Each structure stands twice: as C-alpha cells, then as structure tokens.
C-alpha cells in the first residue's frame, strides 16, 4: 500500500478554492441584485448551503488528517471566516426581501460593487494558498476596498439621518442594511488578515 | 512524594461543567420569563455574576497551571464564549424591563424555547467534554436550533415592519429580536469552539 499523504494535502487546497469560488459567486450575485434592484435571495440561500457543506468537509478532513499542510487552527479559522462572508451576504439579501425594500439606494449599489470586487480578490487570494505568489497585492486590494466601503456607508448614514422625509421604519431598515453590508465587507477583510497570518507563518 | 497531575486537569472540566449548567439555567430562566411575560431579570443578573465568577476561576486556573489538559488559548476561548451567552441573555432580560415591554410576541416566546433547548445541549456537551466523543449530536442539534431561530427572528422582524408603525415599538422589538438572535449565535459559536477543541484533541 502506498501512503497517500500528498493527495490529502491537495484536497485542502481544492476545498479552499471551492469555498473561494463560492464566496466570489455569492458576492457577485449580491452586487448584481443590488445593482438591478431585484433580489436573488433564493440563489444566495443555495450558495450559503453549498458553502456550509464545503466548510464541514474542511472540518471533517482536518479531523481525519494527521499532517495538515497549514496549521489546524488556521485551517479552521479560514474556513469559518469564508463561511461567515457568505452567511452575512445571504442575511443581507434576506433582509432586503423581509423589509420589502422597493428602491435600492445608490450607496447600496455602489457598496455592492465593492463587495463583488472583494469576492473576486478573496477567490484569488485563496487560489494562492499553496505558494503565496503575488498575494500581497491581492490582500492590499481587499484592505483598500474595505476603506472605500467604509466611506460609502458613512456618507450614506449621514444622508439617511439628514433627510426628513423618510419614515422611522425606513430609517431603521436602511441603518440595518448598511450595517450588514459593512459587516460583510469587514468579514472579507478579516479573512484577508487570516490569509496574511498563514502566509507569514509559512514564509 | 507522589505526583498527582490529574486533579488540576479535572478541575478544568469541573469548571466547564459549572459554566454549562449556568448557561442552561440562564437560558431556561429567559425562556420562562418570555413565556410568562414576567421579567426575571434579578435572577438573570445573579446568574450572570455567577458565570463571571466561574470564568474568572478558569482564567486563574490557566494562569496557575503549567500543563493544562487543553491548549491554554482554547480553554480561555471556550470560557469566554460561554460567558458571552450568559451576558447576552442577561442583556435581553434587562432590555425587556428597560423598554417596559408589556406583551411578549409569539416569535419571542418561541425563540426563548429554542434558546432553552440550546442551553440544555450545551450543558450536555460540556458534561462530556473530557472524552470529546459525544459532541457531535449536541453540535448538530445546536446548529439546527440556530437555523430555525434565524428563520424565526428574521420572519418576525419582517412582520414587525409590515404591522407596526410606531417608531419606538419598531426600535424596541428590532433590538430584542436582534439580541435573541445574537444569544443563539453565541450558542453556535460556543459549539464551534468545542468542535475545534475536539478536532485538535482527537
């Protein structure tokens, strides 16, 4: 019998790539839904379930594997972080439905673009887990997007409370939605930080 | 002199058991107060203090023990994640008082029951933490309760905005539903921490 140590290591990278692709697809869906003002919550829920499955697969594989290519703690942290991004994006989309939001604000549309871009960058970063080549630029771009997003939501919140013609319900709903959008992007940044730590440890 | 390395190790698991039963009692109290529409905040605050005490004891024990039965970081993480559950439940109970909520809604009562069940699962999981083998059914049940709870609170929040127009009612109930959901999320987080510990110690 041949010991198959390498294939199992490869399996971790494959699963992370799948998770990265799911994160990117989820954030693109959310970005498009916001841009079109037409919600795609059903699709986002499917993606969320798929991501849950992959996350669990990673957990189980960690459980069964003695020598993991990345430290066990970091594997679990990364899998959980990526899963959180998808969970938050799904929650945002769910709330848009539940709140019966009719018109998406320009700020939310703009924020959606940042999220979609951050998703692409995260997928790229996860693809580079094996050799970390060129990962710095990707991670920096995620930090930049997070700053851009912060500026968008800050301005949006200011506008929300400035204009008086909104009902209290609208103010509460939009305050919540902006907070969710911001948390989603913050989580992208946390994942970037986890990847950075992994890169530093393996340098 | 005989070396006795085990007792201190056991002491950790005893303290986690203590924390587990406090989590369960707290969530049961919260659920009862929601069902009866009568606040038991004084009792919840007592429980919160007791749990703080247990958390501190765990911290002190980690500091004074050279070889811990689990990674030090994991012990501290688990203790603080259990403490978070109790803190959030107490905050929920407090807010119900502060907001002078008169009638508890059905979704909040239902959520209380889910939380009480999750508390029982957490206590059971911690009871068997030492072997790590029996964790899975509890973890799965907590995930299930968290999923159902999510659906419940989200629907309730949606419903809230379709039926209530009074600004302060909206703000109060939105906050209470968010807190109930956060309490359940904290239960799931604690379950995840236990899972991570189990994986590392398998």
Image: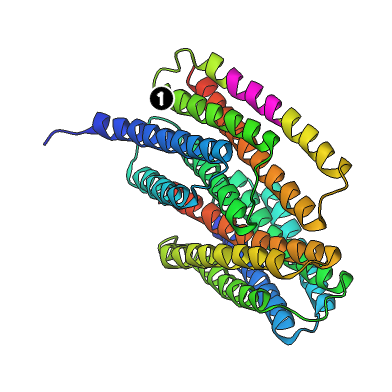
Q: Look at the image and give the residue range highlighted in magenta.
A: A140-149
How would you classify the magenta stretch by its main secondary structure? helix
- The spot of residue B199 in percent (x, y) is 43, 50
Above or below — where is B119 with respect to B54? below
Q: Is residue B135 left or right of residue B76?
A: left
Residue at 49% x, 47% y is A40
**Position in image of residue B113 (x %, y %):** 61, 78
Residue lying furthest left: A1
Q: Position of residue A109 (x, y in %)?
A: 63, 35
Q: Which residue is mark 1?
A: A127
Q: In this picture, is A48 found above or below B144?
A: above
Residue at coordinates 71% horizontally, 64% vertically from top-left? B161
At 76% from the left and 53% from the top, the residue drawn is: A170
User: Is A67 situated left or right of A150 in this image?
Assistant: left
Quarter occupied by residue B53? bottom right
Residue B110, by quadrant, is bottom right
Q: Judge the density around disc 1: few (<14), some (14-19), many (≥20) Cα neighbours within 10 Å.
A: many
How many numbered marks does the figure carry? 1
The picture quadrant where one finds residue B47 is bottom right
Q: Nearer the viewer, residue A89 or A5?
A: A89
Chain letter belonging to callout 1: A
Magenta-drawn stretch contains A141: yes
From the top left corner, tell me how far across and down residue B153 is, in percent. 62, 65
Disc 1 on helix, strand or loop?
helix
- With A157 as the anchor, is A2 left or right in this view? left
Q: Quadrant of the N terminus of chain B?
A: bottom right
Viewer-proximal residue, B140 or A161? A161
Residue B43 inside the magenta-drawn segment: no
Would residue A48 be found to the left or right of residue A84 on screen? left
Viewer can see residue B86: no
Colour mapping: rainbow
Q: Is residue B75 visible?
A: yes
């Amino acid at each position: 019998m041949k010991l198959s140590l390498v294939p199992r290591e490869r399996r971790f990278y494959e699963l992370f790539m799948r998770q990265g692709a799911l994160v990117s697809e989820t954030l693109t869906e959310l970005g498009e839904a916001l841009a079109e003002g037409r919600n795609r919550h059903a699709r986002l829920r499917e993606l969320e379930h798929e991501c849950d499955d992959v996350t669990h697969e990673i957990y189980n594989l960690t459980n069964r594997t003695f020598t993991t290519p990345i430290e066990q703690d970091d594997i679990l942290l990364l899998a959980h972080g990526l899963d959180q991004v998808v969970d938050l994006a799904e929650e945002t989309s769910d709330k848009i439905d539940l709140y019966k939001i009719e018109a998406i604000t320009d700020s939310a549309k703009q924020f959606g673009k940042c999220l979609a871009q951050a998703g692409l960058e995260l997928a790229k970063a996860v693809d580079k887990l094996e050799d970390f080549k060129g990962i710095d630029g990707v991670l920096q771009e995620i930090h930049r997007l997070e700053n851009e997003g912060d500026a968008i939501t800050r301005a949006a919140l200011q506008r929300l409370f400035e204009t008086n013609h909104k009902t209290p319900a609208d103010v509460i709903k939009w305050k919540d939605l902006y907070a969710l959008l911001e948390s989603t992007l913050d989580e992208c940044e946390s994942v970037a930080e986890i990847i950075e730590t992994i890169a530093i440890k393996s340098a | 002199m005989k070396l006795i390395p085990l007792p201190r190790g056991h002491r950790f698991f005893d303290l986690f058991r203590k924390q587990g039963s406090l989590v369960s009692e707290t969530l049961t109290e919260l659920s009862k107060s929601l069902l009866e529409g009568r606040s038991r905040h004084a009792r919840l605050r007592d429980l919160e203090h007791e749990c703080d005490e247990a958390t501190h004891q765990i911290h002190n024990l980690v500091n004074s023990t050279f070889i811990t039965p689990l990674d030090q970081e994991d012990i501290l993480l688990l203790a603080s994640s259990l403490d978070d559950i109790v803190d959030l439940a107490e905050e929920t109970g407090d807010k119900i008082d502060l907001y002078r909520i008169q009638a508890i809604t059905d979704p909040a009562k239902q959520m209380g029951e889910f939380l009480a069940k999750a508390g029982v699962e957490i206590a059971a999981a911690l009871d068997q933490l030492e072997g790590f083998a029996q964790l899975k059914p509890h973890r799965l049940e907590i995930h299930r309760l968290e999923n159902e709870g999510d659906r419940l609170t989200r629907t309730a929040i949606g419903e809230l905005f379709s039926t209530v127009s009074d600004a302060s009612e909206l703000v109060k109930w939105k906050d209470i539903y968010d807190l109930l959901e956060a309490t359940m999320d904290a239960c799931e987080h604690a379950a995840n921490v236990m899972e991570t510990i189990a994986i590392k110690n398998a």
